[in-house]
Image (cartoon, rainbow, N blue to C red):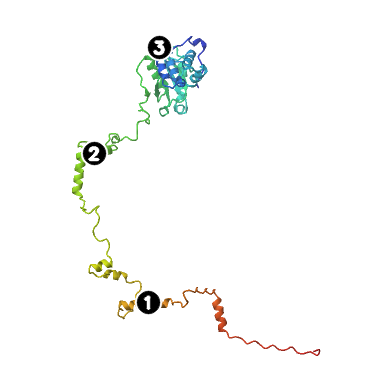
Amino acid sequence: MANRRLAPAAEQPAAFAFSSENAEWAKGQIEKYPEGRQASAVIPLLWKAQEQNGGWLPQKAIEAVADELGMPHIRVLEVATFYTMFALEPVGRFWIQLCGTVPCDSCGARELKDYLHQRLGAPGHVSADGNFSWLEVECLGACCNAPMAQINQDYYEDLTPDLLGALMDDLAAGRPVKIGSQVGRTSSEPKGGADTLTDASLFDGSRVGAWRQRFEDKKAEESSEPSGKAEAASSEQRAATDPKPARPDAGRAVSGQSTDAPAQRAAAGQTPVKSGDQTDAADRTESTVRPGEPTPPPVDTVARAEAAGAEAGTQSDLPRNEPPPQPVASGASEGTDEAKAQPAKKPEPTRAAPKTEGN
């Protein structure tokens, strides 16, 4: 790749200073940065110094930029030797920077390099007429249209050795040249032209932009009438099509009776209990009427219900002031019942022991 060294001392100028115009421009660049951050302007100032010196940076120009920014000379030299955009030795009137990274190398950059070797010689060598010099550089960011080269400030893409030769001939003769793709490609389209999104209706607004036209028409219609009149007309139209019922008592206290108790009904000369309430109070969960029997009167029904309740739970005869007895443990009553059921056995008489001769 590029040899990033300063030009020999024989080619170095004795001094360098910005012209009055460029010095004023450099001052404006430095003022863009806050106090203590003037070093951020090093690249713009190096670029302007290279432009003033005919396309390359001598050592004195690097030192002048360092002094202007208050930086050590070595710090500015590090920047100048890192970026290939800064030429460290004299260049031709047309400086060719050939991209040699993978996309361009895969698409024919090696053939372009061989052609430049044959026509101009080694990288950094200026042609005898002073028109051309070339250098292989890293990626220049036009990989879609590889292989490519930068000549001075412009990109020339889709190159072949023949196209590059014709381009150099036109530049040397002062004839106009085409910047960009040399095979008729538009921007970074595929070779042969675009094959997608070719429908013109996608770009004239008839398809994708039709929704926007509706909003624009509505906005124009609303802006044609005053907002107050339009709102009043809308309210009148809504009232005509969807009237609301009148509610004169809305928000007022109710003067009618809030309850319908039996005492109030009796005072008014009505039956204290409504017939509907009696029907609702009847127990419909269980019917005591048997098929074929007449329906008993209400009094008999109540008497039967009370008798059934008495059978279900017999009243205790214990006094109210005595605590109820503790329940018998499970199984104890069964043993007691069995003991009562079995008759008592009579004890067998004891027999006297037989007497022996000793007694």
- Of the two numbered discs 1 and 3 in the rendering, the one whose residue sits closer to the viewer: 1
User: How many numbered discs?
Assistant: 3
Q: Position of residue 6 (x, y in %)?
A: 51, 15
Q: Position of residue 185 (x, y in %)?
A: 36, 27
Q: Position of residue 294 (x, y in %)?
A: 30, 80
Quadrant in which residue 184 is drawn: top left
- Looking at this rendering, what residue extends furthest in the front direction? 321
The relative height of residue 305 versus residue 223 in the rendered view (above or below) is below
Disc 2 residue crowd, few under 14, some 14–19, many 20+, Cα 10 Å = few
Q: Nearer the viewer, residue 252 or 103?
A: 252
Name the mark on residue 218: 2
Q: CA distance from mark 2 to mark 3?
A: 59 Å
The relative height of residue 17 versus residue 163 in the rendered view (above or below) is above
Say which residue appears at 21% left-offset and 39% top-offset.
228
- Residue type, label 3: Ser
Q: Secondary structure at mark 1?
A: helix
Q: CA distance from mark 1 to mark 2?
A: 81 Å
* Nearer-N-terminus badge (2/3): 3
- Looking at this rendering, what residue extends furthest in the right direction? 358
Q: Which residue is mark 1?
A: 306
Q: Which residue is mark 3?
A: 20
Q: Are marks 2 and 3 in contact (CB under 8 Å)?
A: no
Q: Nearer the viewer, residue 209 or 102?
A: 209
- Can the viewer see residue 85? no
* Nearer-N-terminus badge (1/3): 3
Q: Position of residue 165 (x, y in %)?
A: 41, 19
Quadrant in which residue 218 is drawn: top left
